[in-house]
Amino acid sequence: MRAIARTRIGAPAVAGALALAGAAVAAAVLSVQAAAAPSRQAAPAGAEAVARGVASAPVTVSFGEFFYKPAVITVKVGQQVIFKNVGKIAHTVANTSAKGEILSTLIKLRNLDPRQTQAVSFAKPGTVTYLCTFHPTLMKGRIVVTR
């Protein structure tokens, strides 16, 4: 006859296994609910989000040596803007006054190394000018915020 080895399983291991099993069951239920839901005609992009008062999809501004692309964008109040460093060196994004003075009141100044991002959104309509504090004469942009 073979001997059966007994292993003592601690409470954390059991809790972890139960959590994984619970997550799998929840995913299966959601999948079944989604399959059973009646289909509806697709609304124009962003229409449902606007109807619910949810901000539109984020807008990405890529930057590197020595550009912001696109340099000028238009977003709605509350819509997220994601600045993404696609360059090979660190850059910054800081909002400025109309005269070009660095304010950093709407866009918090911080170094963004290659592949890092910074997300911002704006609470009021208006025009936001910004620049890279390392390269202020070479890297400038503008965001028009509408209702």
Image (tube, rainbow, N blue to C red):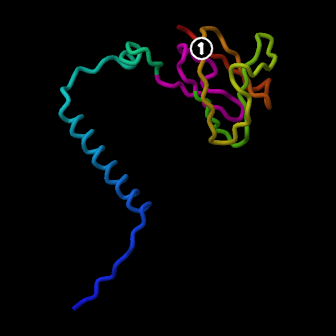
When the figure is inspected, residue 52 is found, relative to residue 3, above or below; the finding is: above
Return the x and y of residue 95 as percentages of the image width and height.
72, 20
Residue shown at 27%/39% (left/top)? 30
Residue shown at 55%/23% (left/top)? 80
Return the x and y of residue 82 as percentages of the image width and height.
58, 29
Any magenta on residue 122?
no
The residue under label 1 is: 123
| Mark 1: few/some/many CA within 10 Å (<14, 14-19, 20+) | few
* Residue numbers of the magenta segment: 57-81
Type of amino acid at the residue the image marks with label 1: Ala
Residue shown at 20%/29% (left/top)? 37
Most extreme residue toward the bottom, as rendered? 1
Q: Is residue 25 left or right of residue 116?
A: left
When the figure is inspected, residue 48 is found, relative to residue 110, above or below; the finding is: above
Q: Is residue 70 left or right of residue 134?
A: left
When the figure is inspected, residue 66 is found, relative to residue 99, above or below; the finding is: below
**Quadrant of residue 118 within the rendered picture:** top right
Q: Is residue 53 left or right of residue 60?
A: left
**Quadrant of residue 88 within the rendered picture:** top right
Any magenta on residue 66?
yes
Helix, strand or loop: magenta stretch: strand
**Quadrant of residue 111 within the rendered picture:** top right
Q: Nearer the viewer, residue 52 or 101?
A: 52
Q: Nearer the viewer, residue 62 or 28?
A: 28
Residue shown at 21%/92% (left/top)? 1
